[in-house]
Image (cartoon, coloured by chain):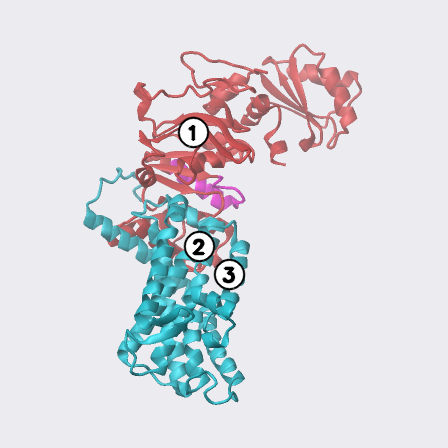
Chain colours: A cyan, B red
Amino acid sequence: MSLATNPISTPANSWTIAANFIQETRALTKRLFIQLIRRPSTLIAGLVQPLMWLILFGALFQNAPEGFLGTSGQYQKFLGAGVIVFTAFGGALNAGLPVMFDREFGFLNRLLMAPLVSRSSIVFASAIFIMALSLLQTVAIMTTIALLGAGVPNILGVLLIISIVMVLVLAVTSLSLALAFSLKGHVELIAVILVTNLPLLFASTALAPISFMPTWLQWIALVNPLSYAIEPIRYIYQHSDWTLGSTVLNAPWGDVSMVACVGILSFFAAFSLWAIQPLLKRSLS
Amino acid sequence: MTVTANITPDNPAVVLSSEGLDNPTGQIKPDSPQAQAAIVIQDLKKSYGAIEAVKNVSLSVQPGEIFGLLGPNGTGKTTTLRCLCTLTQPDSGVLEVFGISVVQNPSAVRQCLGYVAQEVALDKMMTGRELLEMHADLYHLSKAQSLDRIQSVLKTLNLEEYADRLVKTYSGGLQKRLDLAAGLLHNPKILVLDEPTAGLDIESRQIMWQLIRQLRQSGTTILITSHYLEEIDALADRVAILDRGNVIACGTPQELKTAVGGDRVTVRIREFTSFEEATIARDALLKLSVVKSITINEMQGNSLNLVVAAQSDVLALVQAQLENLSLPIFGIARSQPSLEDVYLSVTGQCLNERLN
């Protein structure tokens, strides 16, 4: 073996930089998928849990009076949107855990010692992985809902649902990664996840329409980004004639359209990505 | 207390002081002809809150040499390495790698460095080969380079037969070797090893020593920390002893040992001597003019470690003095000063005591 040392690399042009960034992001993403395949329990749990939500909650309201939700149709059709969003949200919220474990086991230091074009490739890889996983879960839930008789939206509807889920996942993943870089250890991160997860579910429109809630809870639900992901998806499921201008949410201050919900959600994602930049810069510079 | 200080124009790097000196390492000035040192650390300081992990560390490492950092836990070795390896921002001081500022141009520095931390940093769900492939991508090696380098490091570290097994099935020694393989993938000009053989079996340690020497022969500069004095003695061209965040001695192992001066005599009255009996023997032996100092080593059953004048009849004089007290002699041995003696001289404590 030749152990002769390499000279220091010369500065690269922008194409090389882009190619190197793709190479390092791909390598880090591949690692996460290898972990998933070798430890499939995470994937199985991620697929089984939403199905249990659907079946158990669906059964819970099986004998509820027809039309109690204010609209006709099965509770599964109503609940499906909540389960899709809540599952994606839960997965994204956990995105910081592998990074936290890498920090604790010293593996992150090894990654940070590599001459990465940008250390944001570590964040990108996590985001790509969680988005892919969420996509798989979303498709699985949509298939199950269809099998339970709730139907399948048209192709544009499916694409919009997936887009909404991806925007939400991007936002929450970035926040979770920020927590992974800023909190002391995995115990603290898990505590934050536990405190955040279920309260945000119950303080959203996932399980019941906003009209069921007392006013104070309505206001909480309306500052909860999950509601702005759930309502458009629910509307697409319940109205085959949906348009971007359709009113999907009746807030105390007025009606919120489909496009407004997507806009609010996109703003939330953009704000999250912007807000974590100083933290990532400090942790990864 | 200054124990010994033999600083001459020919030997500027040898300084032994328990109090630290202004220029303990004969440090290189930036404008000196030696400015092309592989590593220059000057006046490095780093605190974590109220804890001063590194108070004032200055040293320089020449290209192609093995430089050892010696000291017990908590003396600032790892923090110094982390600052050098761009993992921790220093509070103040100069850190340069081949003239490149670590603080101002960390990315260029990372291309020159391979860092293998004290704790193995591996993904146990991957195979050894998958892990190395990932590291090759992080160092932006081409497919062909990657294949070639992976094959090469696997062969060098005797890991070929384990390459396609999951890392979680590796023994501790194999994991350490794989960790080192990952650090060597990009042919770094400088290899930084933090306690590379801690807890390793004999075979893995031998492989590690062989590789470190091989790398030095091929021109790689190596900065190594260790608890094992014999390891530093055997491997390092030069060594710096750190104590409480300061460099308190620096030089070649031979220079340091010569600077300590005198010979060493170890006396064991019994296999396990009582402290009282050891104290009586110590007081009696100190009356001999050839004996300069005596330490009672509790870690070795209260044996007596004597620093004596380098004259031929020392052993006979010591034996006669103990016979006068009617004390038995379980064992007696004379030796040249070791790095342990150097450490004892500059810190007043055995390294093993500090580790425990």
| Front-lying residue, B137 or B82 | B82
* Element type where label 1 sits in the image: strand
Mark toward the start of the polypeptide (2 vs 3) = 2
Q: Is residue A201 left or right of residue B326?
A: left
Q: Chain of mark 2?
A: A
Q: Is residue B21 visible?
A: yes
Compared to residue B74, the image places residue B263 above or below, namely above
Residue at image mark 3: A193
Type of amino acid at the residue the image marks with label 1: Ser
Magenta stretch: give its range.
B195-214
**In the foreground, B277 or A280:** A280
Label 2 – label 3 distance at C-alpha: 14 Å
| Image quadrant in which the C terminus of chain A is located | top left
Query: Splitting the image into 4 quarters, where does residue A9 fall?
Result: top left
Tell me the CA gap for discs 2 and 1. 29 Å
Badge 2 crowding class, 10 Å Cα cut-off, few under 14, some 14 to 19, many 20 or more, is many
* Residue at mark 3: chain: A
Residue type at tag 3: Ile
Residues at badges 2 and 1 in contact (C-beta under 8 Å)? no
Residue shown at the point (35%, 57%) measured from the top left: A125
Under circle 2, the secondary element is helix
Q: Please say if A243 is above or below B255.
A: below
The residue that disc 1 covers is: B92
Place of residue A105 in the rendered image (x, y in percent of width and height, measured from the top left): 49, 51
Q: Residue at x 36, y 82 (%)?
A: A238
Residue B186 placement (x, y as % from top left) = 32, 45
**Residue type at mark 2?**
Val
**Marks 2 and 1 share the same chain:** no
